[in-house]
Image: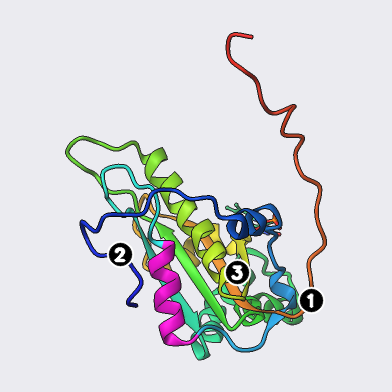
Amino acid sequence: MPDMPELDDIMPLPQKNEAVTAFLKARRSNMAKVMGGAGPSEAELAELLSIAARVPDHRKLAPWRFVIFEGQARSDFGQHIGAAFMKANPEASQDRAIFEGARFMRAPLVVGVISSPVACKRATPVWEQQLSSGIVCYNLMLAAQAAGYGAQWLTEWYAYDADVQGALGMNAGDQVAGFVYIGQALAPSTERVRPDVTAKTSYWGI
Ligand SMILES: Cc1cc2nc3c(=O)[nH]c(=O)nc-3n(C[C@H](O)[C@H](O)[C@H](O)COP(=O)(O)O)c2cc1C
């Protein structure tokens, strides 16, 4: 990864970058249900994760970790999701259990981002650490889309299931920040309703 900066490199000053602005203006998630094809190579994935990790992070705690699901691991992990679903919904049909267990099969790559707030001497509030984990998910999505992949940030029910969390090796205080689904976008998204930014904005004192 020759183009990633080294420690203490002098970083370029901000410059107008119309391509990035246009990319951000048109940014839209790609639905996991219409994802497929080949995922990133090992080298591409390493680059995506390195970019994802370049986030604002109060006191440089890196209070999160990645869990990669590729190939067979997606269906193996799906067994935990399917079993957790049946435990919570014992009346559900076998077809539904199969559907739930196949969730990670929607994309060639799923990256779990686990928020793991750390205790530090001059405590950074947990909320700030969790925000940093959220930006990791978003940065990963942007990096994947900039590399030409479709990406969607999902949690769905299984992010909150104790058995599934156990299978992810999560500790008390950890949260699933997101499962970022990455693959070829097989169909375009359509624009969705966006907030009225003016209604959401005020000038203090006016
Ligand atoms: C933390 C988080 C969890 C999400 N989980 C889900 C989810 O479980 N299911 C879903 O349909 N969308 C979920 N979304 C929303 C999608 O990722 C996406 O933001 C949404 O489809 C809007 O599209 P956009 O990103 O193009 O604005 C989640 C978003 C966030 C920030």
**In the drawing, does residue 147 fall left or right of residue 62?**
right
Task: Single out the residue that lies furthest toward the top.
Answer: 205
Q: Which residue is mark 1?
A: 187
Q: Is residue 167 visible?
A: no
Give the residue type that dot 1 points to. Answer: Ala
Disc 2 element? loop
Marker disc for residue 145 = 3
Task: Single out the residue that lies furthest toward the left.
Answer: 121
Q: Is residue 121 visible?
A: yes
The 10 Å Cα crowd at callout 3, few under 14, some 14 to 19, many 20 or more, is many
How much space separates mark 3 and mark 2, taking CA atoms?
21 Å
What residue is drawn where x is 59% and y is 84%?
A: 108
Q: Is mark 2 within 8 Å of ligand 1?
A: no
Marker disc for residue 158 = none
Q: Position of residue 93 (x, y in %)?
A: 76, 77
Give the residue type that dot 2 points to. Answer: Pro
